[in-house]
Image: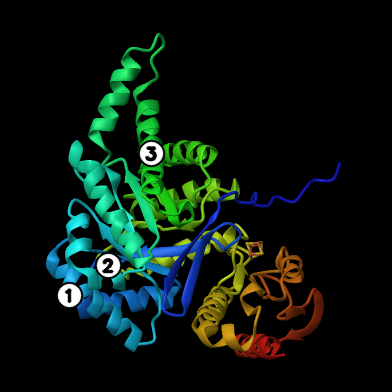
């Protein structure tokens, strides 16, 4: 039997739409898995927030969430939208509401209108009798302004009454579940019951997206597998509070990678804690790279480079790989429109003859630089065939030009 190539399983969710102006962003069904992000500015600072939304959108975020937590923030939202429209940034804005969303969406209709989607956290829309009333006010706003909603459950702010009820029920079981399983059940029940409640209030089920965020990789995989089994709402994936730097990047990549490979997830966010001085856009780059690494989407040409070893004569190949990668990324805003399909291109920059020619042949265009003890020659491969050999001190500049010519042609 031949070995079947691995591929992500098809997704099984229905489709929701997020709209702003002429921009329609579909989520779920056969739409591409969407990249989204969130600002960390004070939304009252409308200019600062608009600038960060613009940066995130340019980095590739297809939807941007902003906190709407006070009357001042709600008042700033239409102004932020106006500034973005003026700058030609038509990325949909999602309002992130907790505790007082029902009041803000009711008392500030311009805010409700300017947003493209509302994130509702069912764990903090009110307790007891107030819960359904306040949740209903948010759904009313969504219906009035024709907006989709994301019902976003988070285990840090889980509905405590629901959790207490499930724990109580569990204690009466002949064979009680472990505490983690009860927590998973509470997350999933909160999301699905809230979606059903929204539908009973008149919301079209196709305008509801669900998320159940937790901060542990195995917990996220367990919860989303079950959530996907129990419903066909589009799912937003993210490891909440993933952490800083390498830890957050690796944990998010692993968790999202497992689920996306199983066909689970329609939109993703990588929630990184930025290091001092680190750009917020890093989370968008990582989310895009996850999708590209899985073969789900292509955003920029990929550069394959070996790690280098004792056979590497100099750092030339590392510098060349970085230069090519930086150049390709920087040109993408122009090239994407000018050269359709360029984002699927593969370039290889390799350090010696051991894997250099082989890897270069697998790429659209590749170069194998000379390693220790090898003749000072760098064969270049184009479309799997050896095309020419570069020699001398200008190998980097000449290869750069060959890549440019290849793209133009
Ligand atoms: Fe080392 Fe050559 Fe392999 Fe690169 S391709 S890691 S230089 S053996």
Where is residue 207? Give x, y as percent.
45, 57
Residue 182 placement: quadrant: top left
Secondary structure under badge 2? helix
The answer to whether residue 194 is left or right of residue 204 is: left
Residue, disc 2: 112
Graded by Cα atoms within 10 Å as few (under 14), some (14 to 19) or many (20 or more), the crowding at tag 2 reads many
Quarter of the rendered image showing ligand 1: bottom right
Asked if one can make out residue 267 in the rendered structure from this viewpoint, the answer is yes
Q: Counting residues from the N terminus, which is met first, the one under dot 3 or under dot 2?
A: 2
The answer to whether residue 366 is left or right of residue 205 is: right
Single out the mark in the foreground, 1 or 2: 2
In which quadrant of the rendered image does the C terminus lie?
bottom right
Where is residue 204? Give x, y as percent.
45, 54
The span from disc 1 to disc 2 (Cα, nearest Å) is 18 Å
Residue, disc 1: 45
Whether label 3 lies within 8 Å of ligand 1 gets the answer no
In which quadrant of the rendered image does the N terminus lie?
top right
The span from disc 3 to disc 2 (Cα, nearest Å) is 24 Å
Where is residue 123? Give x, y as percent.
26, 42
Q: Counting residues from the N terminus, which is met first, the one under dot 3 or under dot 1?
A: 1
Graded by Cα atoms within 10 Å as few (under 14), some (14 to 19) or many (20 or more), the crowding at tag 3 reads few
Depth order, front residue of 199/168 = 199
Single out the mark in the foreground, 3 or 1: 3
Q: Residue 89 carries which label?
A: none
Graded by Cα atoms within 10 Å as few (under 14), some (14 to 19) or many (20 or more), the crowding at tag 1 reads some
Q: Are marks 1 and 2 in contact (CB under 8 Å)?
A: no
């Amino acid at each position: 039997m031949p070995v079947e190539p691995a591929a992500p399983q098809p997704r099984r969710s229905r489709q929701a739409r997020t709209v702003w102006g002429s921009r329609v962003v579909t989520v779920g069904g056969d739409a591409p898995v969407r990249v989204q992000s969130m600002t960390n500015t004070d939304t009252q600072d409308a200019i600062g927030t608009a600038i960060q939304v613009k940066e995130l959108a340019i980095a590739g975020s297809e939807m941007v969430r902003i906190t709407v937590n006070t009357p001042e923030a709600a008042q700033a939202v239409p102004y932020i939208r106006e500034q973005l429209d003026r700058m030609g940034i038509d990325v949909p804005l999602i309002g992130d509401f907790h505790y007082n969303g029902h009041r803000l969406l009711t008392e500030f209709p311009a805010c409700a209108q300017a947003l493209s989607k509302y994130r509702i956290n069912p764990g903090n829309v009110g307790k007891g009798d107030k819960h359904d009333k306040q949740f209903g006010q948010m759904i009313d706003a969504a219906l009035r302004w024709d907006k989709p909603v994301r019902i976003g459950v988070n285990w840090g702010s889980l509905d405590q009454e629901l959790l207490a009820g499930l724990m109580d029920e569990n204690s009466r079981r002949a064979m009680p579940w472990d505490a983690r399983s009860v927590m998973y059940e509470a997350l999933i029940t909160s999301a699905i019951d809230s979606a059903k409640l929204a539908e009973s209030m008149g919301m079209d089920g196709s305008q509801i997206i669900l998320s159940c965020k937790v901060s542990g990789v195995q917990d996220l995989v367990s919860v989303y597998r079950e959530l996907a089994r129990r419903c066909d709402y589009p799912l937003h994936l993210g490891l909440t509070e993933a952490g800083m730097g390498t830890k957050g990047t690796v944990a998010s990549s692993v968790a999202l990678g497992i689920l996306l490979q199983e066909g689970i997830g329609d939109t993703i966010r990588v929630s990184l804690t930025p290091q001092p001085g680190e750009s917020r856009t890093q989370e968008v780059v990582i989310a895009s790279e996850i999708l590209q690494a899985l073969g789900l989407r292509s955003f920029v040409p990929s550069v394959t480079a070996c790690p280098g070893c004792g056979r590497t004569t100099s750092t030339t190949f590392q510098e060349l790989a970085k230069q090519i990668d930086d150049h390709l990324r920087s040109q993408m805003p122009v090239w994407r429109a000018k050269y359709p399909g360029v984002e699927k291109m593969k370039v290889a920059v390799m350090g010696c003859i051991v894997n250099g020619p082989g890897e270069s042949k697998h790429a659209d265009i590749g170069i194998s630089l000379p390693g220790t003890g090898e003749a000072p020659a760098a064969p270049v491969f184009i479309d799997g065939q050896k095309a020419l050999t570069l020699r001398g001190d200008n190998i980097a500049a000449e290869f750069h030009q060959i890549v440019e010519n290849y793209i133009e042609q």
